[in-house]
Image (cartoon, rainbow, N blue to C red):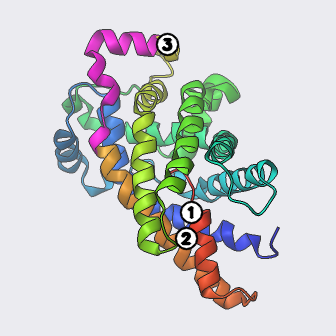
C-alpha cells in the first residue's frame, strides 16, 4: 500500500461531494417519480420549483455529503484489495475478476450506504404543507437527518435503520459489477475525455440494469414506518405491478440517465484535479502524468 493512500481517500471525498451536488437535484425528482403515482419528470420539476423552490431539489443532501468519503473509501479499498487477491500478477485482470471485485466493493459499502440512502429518501419525500398537491401524504416529518435517524432507530432499532437492505443489496452488488466491467470495456485510451465518456456511459448502463430494483428500494424506504404499505420486496413488487402495471419498474429512467453522466463527470473532475493537486503539494515522487494515469485506473466507482 502506498504511503500516501490517504490522498485517494480525500480526493475521493471531494470528487464524491462534487458528484452529489451536481446529481442530487435529478435524484430527488427520480425518487419522487418512483414513489408517487403519475408524476412525470416535468411535473416533478415544476411542482418542486413551484412549492419548495430551488432548495426542494437538495432535500436530503446533508447526510450523503457527510458519508460520501466513507462510502468511497470502502468501495475503493475492498475493490482494489479483492482485485489484488484475484489477480496478483502484472497482467491485466479478466472481466470476470473485475466484476467479482466490483461486486465485493458494492457489498462492503452497504454498511454505510443503506442508512444514508434511507434517510436521504425520507428527507426527499417531505413536502410539508403542499403534500396534497403531490397526491400523497408521507406520514412523517423530520427537522433534519439526525432526527430522522433517531426516529428510525427508536421505532425499529438497528433493523429500522436498514429498511430496504435486501433490495439495495441486490441493486448495489449487481450495479457495481456491471459498472466496473463496462468502464474497463469502454475506456480505450488514457485520456481524460475517454475516461469521462466511459465513466458516464458505464454509469447509465449500470443503473439501467438495476432500475426495477431501484424502484422497489425507493418505495420500501419511502414507506411510512408507522403504517407500512409494503411487507417486503416481493409484496412491494406485487402491489406496484397490480396498481400501476409493468411500466412502474422503469419509472425515473430519464432522470437517472440525465443524472448519471454529469454526476460521473463531476466525480472524475473533482477526484483527478484534487488528487493531482495533493501530489504536487506532497511531492511524493510521482509525476503529474503518472498520477493522472493511475487516477484513470482508479475511477471505477458507483454513483
Q: Kindly indicate whether the residue at mark 1 contacts the one at mark 2 (C-beta within 8 angstroms).
A: yes
Kindly identify which residue carries mark 1. Answer: 299
Category of crowding for the residue at label 3, using alpha-carbon neighbours closer than 10 angstroms: few (below 14), some (14–19), many (at least 20) = few
Q: Residue at x 51, y 22 (%)?
A: 225
Category of crowding for the residue at label 2, using alpha-carbon neighbours closer than 10 angstroms: few (below 14), some (14–19), many (at least 20) = many
Q: Which of the marked residues, 2 or 1, is nearer the chain's N terminus?
A: 2
The part of the chain drawn in magenta is 235-254
On screen, 89 above or below 193? above
Q: Kindly indicate whether the residue at mark 1 contacts the one at mark 3 (C-beta within 8 angstroms).
A: no
Left or right position of 156 against 125: right
Q: Quadrant of residue 194?
A: bottom left
On screen, 10 above or below 105? below
User: Disc 2 versus disc 3: distance between alpha carbons?
Assistant: 38 Å
Q: Quadrant of residue 167?
A: top right
Left or right position of 289 against 90: left
- Residue 14 visible (yes or no): yes
Kindly identify which residue carries mark 2. Answer: 271
Q: Residue at x 59, y 84 (%)?
A: 289
43 within the magenta span: no
Q: Which of the marked residues, 3 or 1, is nearer the chain's N terminus?
A: 3
Q: Residue at x 74, y 70 (%)?
A: 6
Amino acid at each position: 500500500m502506498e504511503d500516501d493512500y490517504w490522498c485517494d481517500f480525500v480526493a475521493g471525498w471531494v470528487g464524491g461531494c462534487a458528484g452529489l451536488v451536481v446529481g442530487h437535484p435529478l435524484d430527488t425528482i427520480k425518487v419522487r417519480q418512483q414513489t408517487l403515482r403519475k408524476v412525470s419528470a416535468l411535473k416533478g420539476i415544476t411542482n418542486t420549483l413551484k412549492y419548495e423552490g430551488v432548495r426542494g431539489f437538495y432535500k436530503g443532501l446533508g447526510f450523503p455529503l457527510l458519508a460520501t468519503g466513507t462510502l468511497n473509501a470502502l468501495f475503493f479499498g475492498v475493490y482494489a484489495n479483492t482485485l489484488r487477491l484475484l489477480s496478483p500478477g502484472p497482467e491485466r485482470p479478466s472481466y470476470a475478476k473485475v466484476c467479482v471485485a466490483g461486486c465485493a466493493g458494492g457489498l462492503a459499502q452497504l454498511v454505510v450506504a443503506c442508512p444514508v440512502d434511507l434517510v436521504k429518501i425520507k428527507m426527499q419525500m417531505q413536502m410539508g404543507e403542499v403534500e396534497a398537491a403531490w397526491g400523497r401524504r408521507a406520514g412523517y416529518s423530520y427537522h433534519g437527518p439526525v432526527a430522522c435517524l433517531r426516529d428510525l432507530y427508536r421505532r425499529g432499532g438497528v433493523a429500522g435503520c436498514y429498511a430496504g437492505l435486501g433490495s439495495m443489496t441486490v441493486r448495489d452488488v449487481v450495479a457495481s459489477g456491471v459498472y466496473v466491467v463496462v468502464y474497463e470495456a469502454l475506456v480505450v485510451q488514457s485520456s481524460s475525455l475517454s475516461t469521462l465518456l466511459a465513466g458516464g456511459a458505464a454509469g447509465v448502463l449500470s443503473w439501467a440494469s438495476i432500475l426495477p430494483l431501484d424502484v422497489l428500494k425507493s418505495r420500501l424506504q419511502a414507506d411510512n414506518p408507522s403504517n407500512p404499505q409494503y411487507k417486503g420486496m416481493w409484496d412491494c413488487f406485487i402491489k406496484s405491478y397490480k396498481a400501476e402495471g409493468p411500466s412502474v419498474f422503469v419509472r425515473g429512467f430519464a432522470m437517472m440517465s440525465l443524472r448519471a453522466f454529469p454526476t460521473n463527470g463531476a466525480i472524475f473532475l473533482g477526484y483527478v484535479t484534487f488528487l493531482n493537486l495533493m501530489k504536487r503539494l506532497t511531492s511524493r515522487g510521482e509525476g503529474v502524468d503518472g498520477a493522472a494515469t493511475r487516477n484513470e485506473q482508479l475511477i471505477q466507482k458507483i454513483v
